[in-house]
Amino acid sequence: MTFRYGQLTCRAGNIGDDLQSLAACQHLPAAPTVFVDRDMIHRHPGTGPIALIMNGWFSGNALAWPPSPSIHPIFVGFHVSDRFKATVRHHVPYLKAFEPIGVRDRSTGQFLESLGIRTETTYCLTLTFPQRERAPAEGRTFIVDAEGIAIPRSVRKRAIKMTHMVPPLGPEATLPLAQKLLDMYQEQASLVVTTRLHTALPCLAMGIPVVFFGSPTEGRTSIINDIGGTIYDRRLHSKSLGRGMLGRAFDAVDWAPKPLDLAAARKRLAHAVRSRGGGAFSEAHR
């Protein structure tokens, strides 16, 4: 059987989705030849079987599940949002056929296990972006989608403020933009301050110090704690709460964090993809 290789995309307008797509493509044995829309994954994407890494957030279109029979799914970094759970409950046999499902976070694993589906917490493939060889001599601070956070003036000074939200232009436009952002962080960032999980994870993977604001109790972002990072409570650090006075009092931020060593997570994720790729991956090497 001859496989083609797919690239999972979406039009949600969040560059984080495109970064997840780029991360997955690093692990394909050959270049992808077809885009597969995450929210239209039930549609038949051309002829022949397509190997597709299912790394990402599945949340919306209940009618678009399960995937087309032509898709050979490789479940690594799979996340089920709350609003997608009802759909998953109706299609348990589909997921059981590909056990163990490699999930992005423990909360997704707990949900699937409650349905009798075996899982393995693999985390997200954005953790496999290569670690940079050296930090920039005169790097910049990037503040990404953290406009509501009280950030000290010393950190904000000369910082570059950005957003990962873009118009839903489609992968032909947003994937090249995602690659340019990745290159910019790698080459220029000395610190990244963000509320975006998929700003934090790629930057941590590349060895960039990150200050992440989120919800310490949210299952989706628990991966930050699991890999050795810190989640600061964005509610306590809100500008609206006396410009973050509660955060300074009860949740003190380390504004000069050390880079993380994610070599073990990177190795485990690469193995998770290879072991699930099976014949779809060995075909490329014949």
Image: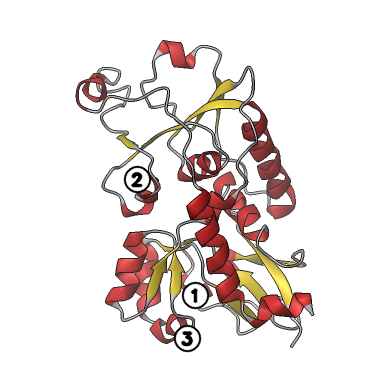
Residue 188's quadrant in the figure? Answer: top right
User: In the depicted view, which residue is nearer to us: 129 or 62?
Assistant: 129
Secondary structure at badge 1 equals helix
Above or below, 56 relative to 212 = below
| Rendered-image quadrant of the C terminus | bottom right
Give the crowd class for mark 3: few <14, some 14-19, many >=20 residues within 10 Å. Answer: few
Q: Is residue 244 above or below residue 125?
A: above
Image quarter (top left, top right, bottom left or bottom right) of the N terminus: bottom right
Residue 127 image offset from top left, x and y in percent = 53, 50
Residue at x 62%, y 49% (from the top left corner): 168
Look at mark 1 in the image and give the residue it sits on. 63
Residue at image point 56% right, 74% down: 275
Question: Whole-percent x and y of residue 248?
Answer: 25, 20
Residue 115 against residue 169 in the figure, above or below: below
Of residue 10 and residue 276, the one placed in the foreground of this image is 276
Q: Amino acid at mark 2?
A: Asn
Report crowding for label 1: few under 14, some 14 to 19, many 20 or more residues within 10 A (C-alpha): few
Q: Which mark is residue 225?
A: 2
266 lies left or right of 185: left
Q: What residue is disc 3 on? A: 97
Location of residue 157 in the rendering, given as x and y in whole percent from the top left corner: 50, 11
